């Protein structure tokens, strides 16, 4: 293994070279630059690279000249990630190289089979993103409080792992460590399956009359939000993790067949019980999702406040809730169909629910329970 110098724990000194100036790569550049770390950018697309440079994510790779990067971050598409990582390991023999692709096992296996120096390589996956893609969608705060998974190989050195961890912590992420196989199995369920289900549901809306869609509320919007994701990227992600995804889809198919069979004769003996059990199983799964700040799930109370659809109303409402002394746990916005009224759905701790309703009513707000 080639020698390299690890920096102080939890703080990169740079320079850092980011290869791939898409949403994640450019966001990493912005985040590191905001912390004073020198960043250089490289992308096969001169336009993408120029945009990332223009918005302040780093300087062009040509200006790196003879300087040796401390860290190389590979933000290439999954189907070419191994090629780019291998090239970076050879081109920069004193650098740690990490990738940020959303699948890990296939890349790690490919690199091992090709004799890569895995002692200086760490597969990572920042679990952050947006429906928008490209450098113009980048945000330096994208990773704040978001999970960032490190998937070191058996050969990965302690020093290389420390540099990869420093990248994630410097950007404000919450670090976890999985094996590559554990990671791919987990994201198949918590990331890849939701994308598939969202896209399948949204595809059913293509021929739906607009008057029917006018009835849509937050439920449909919530479930289909990620259906706006980049098709080209998801072709690569799903293809790279197909084995894990298919195992889960087999179970989904069984559940769908069970539901279809029940609904084909909904008055048959036991049909209603089966439907109730199906919904209850969803309840049981939903409450296992970690709650606020990653802690155990909590039951919150919801209330809805009607606001006029004019500037400043929501800001005023939030200001007054702060004056009342109640902390918001969650907030959602919706609009009343056909009326110039907005609906602000507010989640609070149960012991604050009645107090907040009374206080808002006293201040003239229209509160629904």
Image (cartoon, grey):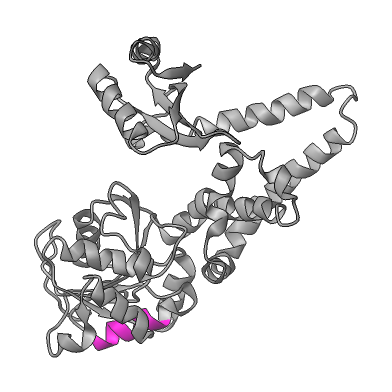
The residue shown at (63%, 51%) is 197
Instruction: Give the dominant element type of the magenta stretch: helix, strand or loop.
Output: helix
Which residue sits at x=68%, y=45%? 213
Specify whether residue 359 is painted magenta: no
Relative to 18, residue 298 above or below: above
Q: Quadrant of the N terminus?
A: bottom left
Horizontal side of residue 127 vs 275, given as left or right: left
Q: Nearer the viewer, residue 195 or 84?
A: 195
* 42 up-or-down from 142: above or below: below
Q: Would residue 229 appear left or right of 290 to someone viewing this image?
A: right
Rendered view: 97 above or below 323: below
* Front residue of this view, candidates 137 and 120: 137
Residue drawn at (70%, 49%), measured in percent from left and top?
210
Q: Nearer the viewer, residue 157 or 193?
A: 193
The magenta stretch is 83-92
The x and y percentages for residue 293 are 32, 36
In the image shown, does 31 or 311 lie closer to the viewer?
A: 311
Give the percent coordinates (x, y) of residue 190: 51, 48
> Can residue 351 be seen at all in this image of the molecule?
yes
Q: Is residue 89 magenta?
A: yes
Name the spot of residue 10 as percent of width and height, x first: 15, 56
Q: Quadrant of residue 53?
A: bottom left
Instruction: Note whether residue 158 is visible.
Output: no
Q: Quadrant of residue 25?
A: bottom left
Horizontal arrangement in the rendering, residue 246 relative to residue 95 (left or right): right
The mark tally for this picture is: 0
Residue 138 coordinates in the image, percent (x, y): 33, 63
Which image quadrant for residue 18?
bottom left
Residue depicted at 32% across the width and 74% down the height: 118
């Amino acid at each position: 293994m080639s020698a390299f110098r690890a920096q102080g724990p939890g703080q990169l000194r740079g320079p850092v070279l980011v290869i791939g100036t898409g949403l994640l790569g450019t966001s990493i550049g912005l985040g590191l630059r905001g912390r004073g770390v020198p960043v250089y950018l490289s992308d096969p697309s001169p336009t993408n690279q120029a945009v990332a440079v223009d918005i302040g994510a780093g300087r062009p790779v040509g200006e790196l000249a003879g300087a040796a990067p401390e860290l190389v971050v590979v933000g290439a598409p999954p189907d070419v990630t191994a090629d780019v990582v291998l090239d970076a390991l050879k081109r920069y023999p004193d650098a740690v190289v990490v990738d940020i692709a959303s699948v890990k096992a296939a890349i790690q296996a490919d690199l091992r089979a090709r004799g890569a120096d895995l002692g200086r390589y760490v597969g990572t996956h920042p679990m952050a993103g947006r429906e928008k893609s490209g450098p113009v969608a980048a945000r330096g705060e994208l990773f704040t409080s978001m999970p960032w998974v490190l998937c070191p190989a058996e050969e990965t050195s302690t020093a290389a792992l420390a540099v990869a961890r420093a990248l994630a912590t410097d950007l404000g992420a919450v670090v976890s460590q999985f094996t590559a196989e554990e990671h791919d199995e987990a994201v198949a369920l918590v990331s890849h399956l939701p994308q598939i289900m969202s896209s399948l549901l949204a595809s059913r809306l293509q021929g739906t009359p607009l008057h029917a869609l006018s009835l849509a509320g937050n439920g449909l919007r919530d479930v289909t939000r990620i259906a706006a994701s980049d098709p080209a990227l998801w072709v690569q992600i799903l293809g790279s993790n197909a084995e894990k995804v298919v195992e889960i889809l087999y179970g989904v198919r069984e559940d769908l067949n069970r539901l279809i069979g029940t609904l084909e004769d909904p008055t048959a003996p036991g049909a209603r019980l089966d439907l109730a059990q199906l919904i209850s199983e969803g309840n049981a799964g939903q409450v296992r999702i970690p709650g606020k700040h990653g802690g155990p799930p909590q039951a919150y109370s919801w209330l809805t406040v009607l606001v006029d659809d004019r500037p400043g109303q929501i800001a005023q409402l939030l200001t007054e809730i702060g004056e009342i002394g109640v902390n918001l746990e969650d907030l959602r916005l919706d609009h009343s169909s056909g009326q110039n009224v907005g609906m602000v759905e507010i989640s609070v701790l149960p012991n604050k629910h009645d107090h907040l309703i009374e206080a808002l009513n006293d201040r003239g707000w229209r509160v629904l329970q």
